[in-house]
Image: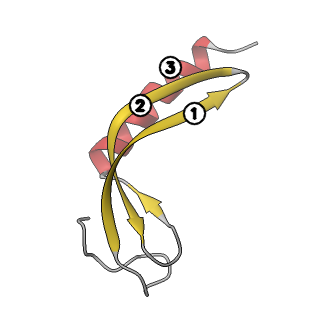
């Protein structure tokens, strides 16, 4: 996936690369992943990231959710 690719969701827009902070809240606790590269559709707003970044964040979120069980 790269900037300029056709959106896999709407197939009309193109993806633009953005660097942003991703924030997730679970049971009142928040975790922030700063300066993550995302790809956002110019038409439908679909947002995705690289497979490597997604796998890394998924792993960190699993730990975060486990640590914040009530």
Q: Residue at x 28, y 44 (%)?
A: 52
Q: Which type of secondary structure does the marked residue at label 2 adopt? A: strand
Q: Is residue 17 left or right of residue 12?
A: left
Q: Position of residue 53 (x, y in %)?
A: 32, 42
Q: Position of residue 59 (x, y in %)?
A: 42, 30
Give the residue at mark 3.
Answer: 63
Give the residue at mark 2.
Answer: 33
Give the quadrant of residue 69. top right
Check residue 24 in the rendering and tell me which mark sits there, or answer none.
1
Image quadrant in which the C terminus is located? top right
Is the residue 4 above or below the residue 26 in the image?
below
Image quadrant in which the N terminus is located? bottom left
First in sequence: mark 2 vs mark 1: 1
> Label 2 vs label 1: CA separation?
9 Å
> Label 1 vs label 3: CA separation?
13 Å
First in sequence: mark 2 vs mark 3: 2
Q: Is residue 21 left or right of residue 35?
A: right
> Label 2 vs label 3: CA separation?
14 Å
Give the quadrant of residue 2. bottom left
Quick one: which residue is furthest to the bottom in this view? 12
Q: Residue at x 50, y 82 (%)?
A: 10
């Amino acid at each position: 996936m790269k900037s300029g690719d056709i959106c896999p969701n709407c197939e009309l827009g193109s993806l633009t690369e953005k660097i942003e902070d991703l924030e997730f809240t679970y049971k009142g606790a928040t975790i922030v992943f700063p300066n993550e590269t995302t790809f956002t559709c110019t038409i439908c707003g679909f947002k995705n990231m690289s497979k490597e970044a997604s796998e890394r964040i998924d792993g960190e979120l699993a730990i975060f959710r486990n640590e914040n069980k009530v």
